Amino acid sequence: MPVEKTNIFIVDDNYLMVTALKQYLQNKFGESVEITTFNDGENCLKMLHKEIHIVILDYLMAGKNGLETLKSIKITNPKTTVIMLSGNEDIALAIESFRAGAKDYVVKGVDSWKKLTSLLTDIIKKPLHFIVKGFGGSNKN
């Protein structure tokens, strides 16, 4: 039986960053993920009819900003995990993102992709851990 892939959207208007992040995550998670990229929130929202597990979302974009997009995602697909990835270090924006339903707020920088990898690993492997545990598997991670 084929294993279901984790669907990930990356939404950011910086094409080079999106392309590099997609390649980085594809190398880290391989065939277990299906990654789709968008350069704005509007196009991301048009594709939310699919089962999307995770959205990595920039804040500052043309058109709908990341916070507006986050709110729309949570209305359309409340179970989708959203991680804000932004160059904006404003704590008030981070708090507002959490209140709107973001799982985490990662500031772009030297360790941001490492932090993303850690968050995604937890999100992707956690359901599998519970399934294995539920069927009498090992409790080890």
Image: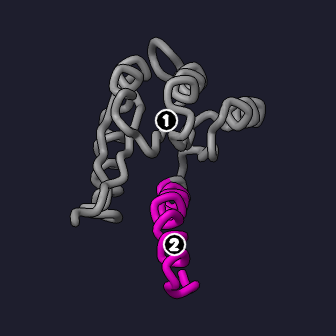
In the rendered structure, the answer to whether residue 119 lies left or right of residue 98 reads left
Whether 92 is drawn above or below 53: the answer is above
Residue 134 falls within the magenta-colored stretch: yes
Residue 116 falls within the magenta-colored stretch: yes
Res 110 visible: no
Tell me which residue sits at (40%, 40%) in the image. 52
Tell me which residue sits at (38%, 39%) in the image. 51
Q: Nearer the viewer, residue 74 or 70?
A: 74
Element type at mark 1: strand
Give the number of the disc on residue 57.
Answer: 1
Quick one: quadrant of the C terminus? bottom right
The main secondary structure of the magenta stretch is helix
Quick one: quadrant of the N terminus? bottom left
Picture quarter containing residue 9? top left
Whether 20 is drawn above or below 46: the answer is below
Amino acid residing under circle 2: His
Q: CA distance from mark 2 to mark 1?
A: 26 Å
Q: Looking at the picture, how far across and down is residue 24, in whole percent?
A: 33, 57
Magenta residues, as a range? 113-141
Please rate how many residues cluster around mark 1, counting C-alpha atoms within 10 Å: few if below 14, some from 14 to 19, many from 20. Answer: many
How many circles with numbers are drawn on the protein?
A: 2
Please rate how many residues cluster around mark 2, counting C-alpha atoms within 10 Å: few if below 14, some from 14 to 19, many from 20. Answer: some
Picture quarter containing residue 13? top left
Give the number of the disc on residue 129.
Answer: 2
Q: Nearer the viewer, residue 24 or 29?
A: 29
Amino acid residing under circle 1: Leu
Give the number of the disc on residue 48.
Answer: none
Q: Looking at the picture, how far across and down is residue 90, in whole percent?
A: 72, 33
